[in-house]
Image: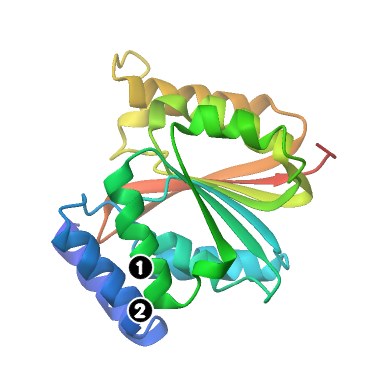
Amino acid sequence: MSEQLWSAVDAYLCGLLVPGDPALDAALEASAAAGLPPIQVAPNQGKLLQLLARMIGARRILEIGTLGGYSTIWLARALPPDGTLITLEADAKHADVARANFSRAGVDRQIDLRLGLALDTLKQISTEGIAPFDLVFIDADKANIPAYFSFALDFTRRGGLVIVDNVIRSGAVIDAASADPDIRGIRQFNERIAREPRVSATAIQTVGSKGHDGFALALVTADP
């Protein structure tokens, strides 16, 4: 099987189940025009995030890693009118593109974009009394995933979800000898959720227009 075939299958599925959306399409176009890396979730993955948020009746969502705000828009659209989403971004240029995308999509009033290093921002959030969240989506630098997950576990209500993207890395995750900080971070995270008694978790590898990767899904089974 080839990435060309995977992409063709994604196109087929998206054509049936994820029809074109002007605001989402414009967000992708604006991100590309600004030179942002094309590493956002695929359309069918974005809809999966939205469906998961809707399934649990999410009212408060935390996203770690905004990029151009594509996944943020998907998640924000799952919220009720009084719901809120906090998204964290370290790059000012990415944040500017995302804010414009939120405004165009009409979801800007429900989104609180925090600019700064996520570990610093998460420490600030821990003092604000905002938590617990219903859903946390982690899609940022992989070396710090174990630390992000620790915060997420402290911030997420019992019955809430923590979703972590890019946990397979074209299969490189199985290389125990890797010196790559991203691979080491992902492996440490996977080992953490395997022994973490406060979650019930699994990980799924995926293929598609974004290549060979995957995500982890953790159901929080204890109060934070």
Which of the two residues, 11 or 80, is positioned nearer the viewer here? 80
| Badge 2 or badge 1: first in the primary sequence | 2
Disc 2 target residue: 23
Residue 121 versus residue 15 in the image, above or below: above
Q: Amino acid at mark 1?
A: Asn
Q: Between residues 203 and 219, which one lies in front from this camera angle?
A: 219
Name the colour scheme: rainbow
Q: Residue at x 60, y 25 (%)?
A: 192
Q: Which residue occupies the extreme right position in the image?
A: 223
Q: Residues within 10 Å of mark 1 (few under 14, many from 20)?
A: many
Tell me whether circle 2 and circle 1 mark residues in contact (CB < 8 Å): yes
Specify the label residue 101 is tagged with: 1
Q: Label 2 sits on what residue type?
A: Ala
**How far from the left and from the top, in percent, is residue 49?**
52, 63
Disc 2 versus disc 1: nearer the observer: 1
Give left or right: position of 168 versus 74.
Answer: left
Residue at the spot x=22%, y=66% of the render?
30
Q: Residue at x 47, y 47 (%)?
A: 215
